[in-house]
Image (cartoon, rainbow, N blue to C red):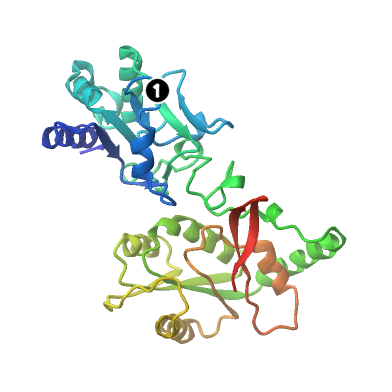
Amino acid sequence: MGAWPNSWLALAELVQSQPDADAYVLLQDDAVLYDRGNLREYLESALWPGDKPSLVSLYCSQAYTVLEPGWRALPRQWIWGALAFVFPRELARQFLTDPKVMAHRWSNSRNGLSHVDVLIGEWTAARHHAVHYPCPSLVQHVGNTSCIWSNINNQGYRRADWFAGDLEMPFARDYSLSDFPEHQFPCRAELQQEYSRRIEIGRERMSQRRVVICGLCRNVRHFLPRFAARAEQLGAMFRDYRVVLFENDSTDATLEFLTDWQQLNSRVHVLSERLGTVRFPQIRSRERAARMAEYRNRYRDYALEHFGDFDNLIVVDTDLGGGWSEDGVANTFSHDDWDFVGSCGMVRTNSDHGSELIHFDA
């Protein structure tokens, strides 16, 4: 049906089914919301950010990013992004019944199927309604391409360059899905020359080897766009690569994403089972460790059977919000005296001394 007809019908159904609601939230299908706190509770206290109920976008495109955090009204006509709009009740009614809004379906622009954001911008400008938005963005656009128009890439102004949900938020400006902030983890100055030499040696050795990248997946849909981009970028540093993942019992769209990825990239192999097992919290537990060992042996056995002649195997967590250092991997491959190398996981935390990186997991 197209983006615009679906948007109008969805909002109309909300208004008709819940006519006395104070507000209506209209989300597009490839939106990830900030989830490191209670977003609904926050919005119930923050709305409305102006002196009267106004249209609110929870999404802030790169086009509208400013350095000072907080809510603001866009001083010009809204153009970029209809990813997540909050309509006050009265504005929702006015919008749905406006003759010019209704006439958009018969416009010449993509047969009236798209440009929801442009239409909303034109309507609010004509009615002198403000559009408020947060910076950093409370929503990120995660579709790698539009699910309707596959030739439109999710980059530039189609993304938020400062998203509140990013674990890398302090250095989230001007990044791609596969980026890792190497500059945040410098080695000591007196070792920099040797480290750079090691990276060169390691990258050359990696380009001559074949690698299998493995991991476990359960309810990690939020992390998968970045994980997929990072895994492919890491794999491209080798002569050849394969990705072998074991998924079980996900209740989100993890399996759907992995299935799509597997269809797009023939090097990706997804093993999936519905085992009905409990999802353990991240605690010390012998039963949890035994289960994870069982799952890891599934991809290990598959990798040995199908890619046993490959040179190396890399195991990564698929829910690493911050990714991994490719320079660090290259440094490892520059050395000869090892059989296994493990990582030290870091997490950014807030303390009385400000934001800092601390050791999280081995």
Q: Nearer the viewer, residue 49 or 78?
A: 49
Res 52 quadrant in image: top left
53 vs 357, left or right, is left
Image coords of residue 340 (percent x, y):
64, 82
Depth order, front residue of 63/264:
63
Q: Position of residue 80 (x, y in %)?
A: 42, 30
Q: Is residue 300 above or below residue 246?
A: below
Identify the residue at image location x=65%, y=78%: 341
- Compared with 42, 80 (above or below) is above
Residue 324 screen position, x and y as percent: 60, 63
The N terminus - image quarter: top left
Q: Is residue 91 left or right of residue 184?
A: left
Of residues 328 and 37, the one drawn nearer to the viewer in this rendering: 37
Looking at the picture, does residue 157 appear above or below residue 196? Answer: above
Visible in this render: residue 79? no
Q: Residue furthest right?
A: 190
Q: Which residue of the protein is positioned furthest toward the front in this rendering? A: 352
Rendered residue at 47%/40% (across/down): 159
Q: Which residue corresponds to mark 1?
A: 50
Looking at the figure, which quarter contains the C terminus? bottom right
Answer with left or right where residue 178 lies relative to residue 225: right
Point 59% across, 55% down: residue: 349
Q: Specify the quadrant of the image occupied by residue 129.
A: top left
Whole-percent x and y of residue 87? 28, 29
Count of numbered marks: 1
Q: Secondary structure at mark 1?
A: loop
The answer to whether any part of residue 65 appears in the image is: yes
Q: Residues within 10 Å of mark 1 (few under 14, many from 20)?
A: some
Q: Residue at x 47, y 26 (%)?
A: 72
Residue type, numbered disc 1 = Gly
Q: Could you say which quadrant of the image residue 194 lies in? A: bottom right
